[in-house]
Image (tube, rainbow, N blue to C red):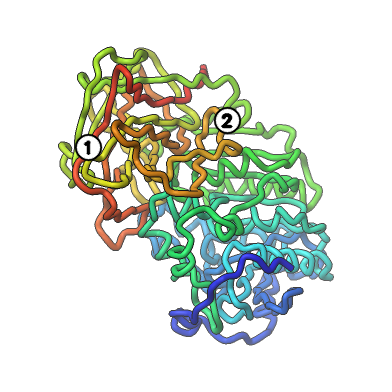
Amino acid sequence: MTTEPRYSFRPPRSTPESRRGVPPRPRTETLPDMLIDRDVEVETRAGHTVQADIYRPLSGEPAGIIIAWSPYGKHDPAPIGKIYPASGVLPEHMSDLTTFEAPDPVFWVPRGYALIIADMPGTWFARGPATYLSPEEAEDFYDLIEWAGVQPWSNGKVGLSGVSYLTAAQWRVAELSPPHLAAINPWEGWSDTYREVARHGGIPETSFWPYIWERWGASTGEIEDLERETAEHPFFDEFWASKASALEKITVPAFVVGSWSDQGLHTRGTLEGFRRISSAQKWLFVHGRKKWAQYYVPENVQLQLEFFDHFLLGKGNLDHWPHVRAEVRTGFNQGEVIEVEGWPVADTEYRRLYLDGATGDLGASVPAVETELTYHGLGDPFEAERLVFEHPFTEETDLIGHSTATLFMSAPAAEDMDVFVGLFKRDTAGKIVPFVYYAQYEDGPVALGWIRASHRELDTELSTDFLPVLAHRRSLPLEVGGPTELVIEILPSGTRFSAGESLVLVVQGTDIKRYPKPLTYARHQTDLNKGPQLLHTGGRYSSHIVIPVVKTR
């Protein structure tokens, strides 16, 4: 068993009872078309326990197994539409037995499946302590898969499903190749906790991350103290490496679903998961809509069924499935789903557009005249505290994939600086086109990027021509006597621009999108910025963005 790195633990701040949990009472309930084994306890090699509810066919015949591994509570039927009213999930798309971000037993059991909803060790009434997305947790998950694979009601083939944490845990356990694991369905889940959740571009995330570690923390025992660990580990060290997926080790068949809309949470990790896993049989569908709604809409549940039918029940084939499908968005909940070759898309033209501080244009060549533009680093919501550049398209253009910004920046009154960039679409009437953002909001950008200047050092082994990956190993001071070059990863997106529409680049010192508290999204309440921030363009300072142009027609 893995013992390093050592984790910090603390008592939980909420008990199961305080959040509607009921102490275990093992029993079997009979419904007209299923059996429900409640509070089944499974012990792992580490001496931890999993508490599971098992929904299985009334006939008792061996079934394909689908596991949803969760910190959110198997007892808790979660009407996502009530918890998050703007989530887009319709009540008719789930039953009263559906738990948070997990498959619906009422759909799956009559179709030959046993569904296991599992409280992971250390959460609720399961014995721990709880660690989150750790090697130890993955080993516990492995043991549950192997236990499920040999039960008399199991056909020996296990699949994994679920959204968000229920996907992030899939990446971790699939690295270990449990013998009975036959297929995974990662649906919107990060794969690198440091880069994709806790620190964006090196900037601490101050909204979702603190909120979610409390949401995971209902327990009767000790839980991992993520608050303390996050403060103690500002750089990507062995602790954070222990919470990043070794994606290349994954070989199991995978149907991966991501979205352009989960910027700052799941977009990057899901697409990196698909790109980097070694599975010979893998499929990707990436859309631009709300993640929870898309998991439960009937047409997508039917895709899940086709996938699991093939790999768990030996029914049908997926020969007709394109390996990569992507929605090219035109507006809010509007777009065209197309088939593309590979991810990143083959034959992408990575086009450079240079910032011109004198005109506000994004153009094909470096401006001859050097300019220096300024805004206040902490700013306010006013337009004057951001810089805006624009590139009109003369013909229909699809941008599908990763973008990058290379900016020459300085901060004369500060020792470090946080820089935020956003891409937007402006229509021919001059209005900004809204998109889905962070699963609930409906006025989002095309894409976002962030960087803390002291974290600008690139990891040369992980970086690619289209994706700069920051090392996050040490702090570098700003350059003396001149601007500092910052290479900023802009998260993947898929957007169509008609002739006459424009790509808009925004640069500022605070979050691009701002919503009132307590709304949760990727928020960065930085107090690091001080005084003005300067952007240098033209001449010696070839500040530019790189955009992924794909020919789809």
Give the quadrant of the N terminus: bottom right
Q: Is mark 2 on a helix, strand or loop?
A: loop
Amino acid beneath label 2? Pro
Residue 317: percent from the left, percent from the top?
76, 39
Q: In this view, does 274 lie above or below 29?
A: above
Q: Report the residue at 69% width, 65% height from top.
A: 141
Residue closest to the eye, 457 or 477: 477
Q: Of 23 and 474, which appears nearest the observer? A: 474
Question: Which kind of residue does numbered mark 1 sit on?
Answer: Arg
| Residue on which disc 2 sits | 344
Residue 60 at x, y percent in the picture: 80, 70
- Asked if residue 501 can be seen in this view, the reply is no
Tell me, for residue 117, which label it has, or none: none
Q: How far apart are marks 1 and 2 (CA)?
A: 31 Å
- For disc 1, the marked residue is 386
Given residues 417 and 194, the one toward you in this image is: 417
Q: Is residue 66 left or right of residue 504?
A: right
**Relative to 422, does residue 120 appear above or below in the rendering?**
below
Q: How many marks?
A: 2
Asked whether the residues under the numbered discs 1 and 2 touch, taking CB atoms below 8 Å apart as contact, a structural biologist would say no
